Amino acid sequence: MNFFIAEIINAIKLGSIYALIAIGYSIVYSILGLINFAHGDLMMVAVYSLWVLMNLKIPFALAVILAVIITMLLAIITERVAYRPLLNNGEETLIITSLAVSILLQSISQAVFGIDNKALKVPVFFTKRIQIADFTVSVMNFVILAVTIVSVIVLAFILKKTRIGLAMRAIKDNSLAADFMGINRKAVIVAAFGIGSALAALAGITYTGEYVSFDPQMGFMLGIKAFIAAVIGGLGSITGAALGAFVLAFLEIFFAGYLPDSIASYQTVFVFLILILVLLVRPDGLLGKNAKRS
Amino acid sequence: MLKVNELNVSYKEIRAVRNVSLSVERGEIVSLIGTNGAGKTSVLRTLSGIIKPESGSIIYNGEDITGLDAHETVKRGIVQVPEGRQVFSTMTVRENLLLGAYLVKDKKLNKKRIEEIENMFPILSERKNMLAGKLSGGEQQMLVIGRALMSGGELILLDEPSLGLAPKVVEEIFNIIIKLKQMGKTILLVEQHAQEAIDISDKVYVMETGEIKKAGNATTIGDSEDIRSIYLGADKTT
């Protein structure tokens, strides 16, 4: 029983992190139809930025804010330099470009910081463990969940109540009509990259805050898994991305926890298997267009 | 108000618009009629900046606006009601109206305009929280006309407003167009219902395979035998 509850806590933690990343994927996808494979690497950028800033003795809270801002700026620059010139060249071109951006970011970070693992030492407050009944849970667990919940609420507010949010939903709904309304699509794309990369930065920082070690490749596999979560939930749908993230995290954690060790090491294979199964039954994901029609 | 000179537009490597010149005076209803694929929609989309012309010029209120993006033309008062209505179907009726005023930052003005539009189309007030995709075709057409009015634009480009609507609703839409004129709006209308369009127009241009074949005031065009032949031709090709 204790093991079961511990696994649930782990799954919520992992699901929260996947959700932050997956929602970012979905926002960018819904605005410009780009599956941004460099999205995961933005987490790595955020973590390295934070690590550098902390080594410069900048207070932790300020360093986190600066790391998020640096990540957002970098994302906006990549949009400007890499994606915008190719905007009318089709989705395939954009996807390949995003893979190139991903490799570029990883290579730069390898060249500058080396290939070896580093450790992020967050203030002790976060690693303190709190006793709940028979369990001790680290403060970081609560922080991760709180960051995800607050991010989702802020995002919902932006989408429902602000002008830029209205524009984002309009483009997702009918991009031609949005053009006719005088919505400047380029400006909205920049906003989508800004929001998506801020979420990725928060995901990277909380993830590394919990699991400590990081390296230049850290974002790639996490990014792929979160992308799978977004596809399972229905790419382009924000609720779908969050749902897919938790579904994937629960299945992944329980697969690794309850099956014999010899099979459990195939955790990642299992993730892809879930993806294939979901797409067989629902090609547009759990909350995709198919779901709406039926 | 609007002067188009020698406009040439290619769409997907096909010359869709050839040497089109036309002019619209303030307060007029001007119709652009012609068969399917004659290039009428391309003309409208070029005027609003969705597609870019190869050559030619568009002068609006004395300013050269050739090649400006849509958000620039909307800002200057040109607003398009697109073919096929193009509502934001997953958003509410009220949100659709607000999107029409996307470039208008004066909240009081927006509120006033919403009131005026809901007076004009009471159904939009009744259904303000309904998703636009759930409205009937005629209601959607009223919504997109209301949405265009929200921008405060003076020149309204109406692309096939009667497309796919029941005859009774078509009549209603034409009455609305007349009302828009009475409100002081200037209208450039693209229509398949040629006779009805001619009846309410001050000036008519007839387009065929990308070119203006005939231009004139409503009476001369309405009496012209050529118009009939063009429409008989249309029946064979569509």
Image (cartoon, coloured by chain):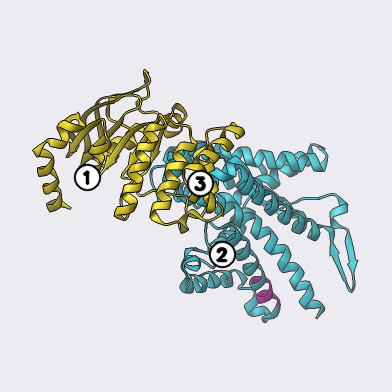
Chain colours: A cyan, B yellow
Mark 3 vs 1, N-terminal side: 1
**Relative horizontal placement of residue A147, taking residue A93 as reference (left or right):** right
Q: Answer yes or no: do the residues labelled 3 and 1 have beta carbons within 8 Å?
A: no
Residue type indicated by callout 3: Asn
What is the spatial separation of the Cα atoms under label 3 and label 1, in whole angstroms?
29 Å
Residue A153 in the image: above or below residue B7 = below
Residue occupying the point 56% across, 60% down = A230
Find the magenta span and give its range.
A252-257
Q: Position of residue B205 (x, y in %)?
A: 21, 33
Residue occupying the point 67% across, 52% down = A215
Residue B11 in the image: above or below residue B123 = above
- Indicate which disc residue B37 carries: 1
Magenta stretch contains residue B128: no
Quadrant placement of the N terminus of chain A: bottom right
Neighbours of disc 1 within 10 Å: few (<14), some (14-19), many (20+) = some
- Indicate which disc residue B96 carries: 3
Residue A264: quarter of image = bottom right
Characterize the magenta stretch by its predominant secondary structure: helix
* Local secondary structure at mark 2: helix
Q: Position of residue B19 (x, y in %)?
A: 20, 28
* Local secondary structure at mark 1: loop
Q: Which residue is mark 2?
A: A233
**Relative horizontal placement of residue A262, taking residue B86 as reference (left or right):** right
